[in-house]
Amino acid sequence: MLSVLKMVLCIVLLVLSTTSGLVQGWGISHGYPGTGAKCERLSVSFCRGLRYNLTAMPNFMGHEDQRLAERGLTAFMPLVHYNCSRHLRLFLCSVFAPVCSEHVAMQIPACKSLCLSVKRDCEPALTSFTLPWPHMLDCDRFLDRGNALCVQPPDETWDDTSPLVLPTVQQPTMHEQTPQISIQTQQHQHQQHNQCPPHFVQIPDVETISCAPHCGTDAYYRAEDKRFAERWMTGWAWLCFLSTLFTLLTFWVEPSRFRYPERPIVFLALCYNLLSVAYIIRGLIGAEKLSCASQVDGPSYVPVHDALKSVPCTVWWLIRHYLGLAGNTWWAMLCGCWLLSARNEWSSEALHNIATYLHVTAWIIPALFTGGSLLSRNVVADELTGLCQIADESALWLEVLPHAVLLLLGCIFGSIAGSALVRVRRAVRCAGRSATKLERLMTRLSIFALLYALPALGGLVCVLHEASVRPRWQKLALLAALDCRAVQNCTPGPVYRAAGLEVALLRLFLSLAVGVTSGMWVWSGKTCRTWTKLFAAPSKPSRIHTPFQDFKQDIA
């Protein structure tokens, strides 16, 4: 009998005269017949197992039945998934599915002490994402247990293995759904009302209703943040385009400077040149034409598993993903060619003879990876940049892992080639000959490798960080938007500092900086002399014709 009294729903019976004031404060009728509310069997699945099986409607949020209460409860699932408080489940159930007893003429709400306990535990988690505590759960709405009949927190000294303790909820992982929040429903679509807050669009499916940011509004990010991100992205795209274009033109003018093992630098620059064009096109046409799709309640940014319904989004992502993989593949090819040249003493002609195999590998493998990623349909549009990208739930396997493998392979090849060049330099010095040119070449190779590998590695770290943080932040941001809808004089939209903004901008910079630094190979006085000769003797057709033939022959 005593163990039953120490259950999770500890109820403090106090002066009965205060009950009428509590009922009026919440706008809830008594549980007696004829008053509009009576005890009924608890059917909210989230609240089962809390040692009570009767509830009464309407609840303290104004829901008329348990079906609506369960829908409203799912808006707080981000907090539940975050597992910030052991009493959170008890507190939410006492609000959405309040305890009802045939011996008490009212629904029994949560005590203020229970609310304060949950707020103390969960508010730091919200603060870390610059989100406020929900107004609809303001603890001042709840009465002290010394003045009312209410549900108080369980005894903190109970053993976690006790059957009376609330079950724990696992932490979310980086593979959770990202830009839209699923909300469970238990009736057909024509019976559903819009559960999404302002600036979000409802996307019904067979079993779920999702909320995605509405195009043309500020849902997760402020307008000034999106404008700055667009200018930042477009500016670096133009710089990448000009740098890689200069490399390509230099090869066109003097292809003899780019013999193997240096020739893959040209195709590396070509990949990033075309990639920068894709970013420039995004800046010219705008975000909505690229990454928005029509939904039931208006256009929204393309949600997960829906990218194929937006042709521009799919095409842009295919180009971006393919060129990024191809660029990393050519990086691995470049390091492999230097390895064969420095360690195995392959000549330029020998490497040129296997150029066809290099091209097949470098262009076909990225196409296979891109096709497989497209079949998974894990492509989503980002509100901040207006770009289509791999969803956070699949970023590790479809985005980070292929690029990391290619980057690591190139670094391994480059390290072995570097150690081989060190041995060659030592042998040259021992023979009494000058190693100045070899040392200059080694310096250029080292700088070029660092300027490529470090930004590429930093970009992958940024993707991993966003994939782990952004899903939780977006869910909590949607919860704040839902809370704003229920509060008077609350302006919808992101009124707080967007989480992860700096990381997203850094990722954009690093993805394009790799292309900028790829032109470093032609930043020399020899290039200036080459261009000077070209403009000094423009009448020589052979200087213009030969590079075309060499370039076409190499690609073929």
Image: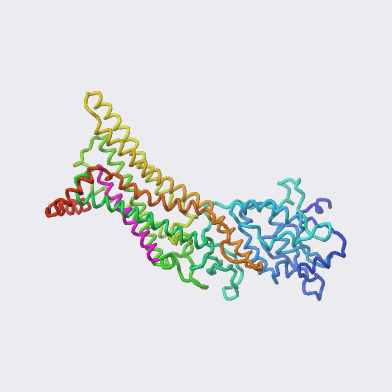
Q: Is residue 508 magenta?
A: no
Q: Main secondary structure of the magenta part?
A: helix
Mark yes or no: residue 193 visible.
yes
For the record, the magenta segment spans 261-285
Mark yes or no: residue 354 visible.
no
Q: Is residue 263 magenta?
A: yes
Query: Left or right: where does residue 5 sit relative to residue 408?
Result: right
Residue 483 found in image quarter: bottom right
The total of numbered circles placed on residues is 0
Q: Nearer the viewer, residue 435 or 171?
A: 435
Residue at left offset 52%, top offset 61%: 222
Q: Residue 215 placed where, x, y %?
A: 49, 68
Q: Nearer the viewer, residue 536 or 393?
A: 536
Query: Left or right: where does residue 168 sit relative to residue 112?
Result: left
Compared with 16, 162 (above or below) is above
Q: Residue 47 placed where, x, y %?
A: 69, 60
Residue at left offset 61%, top offset 61%: 480
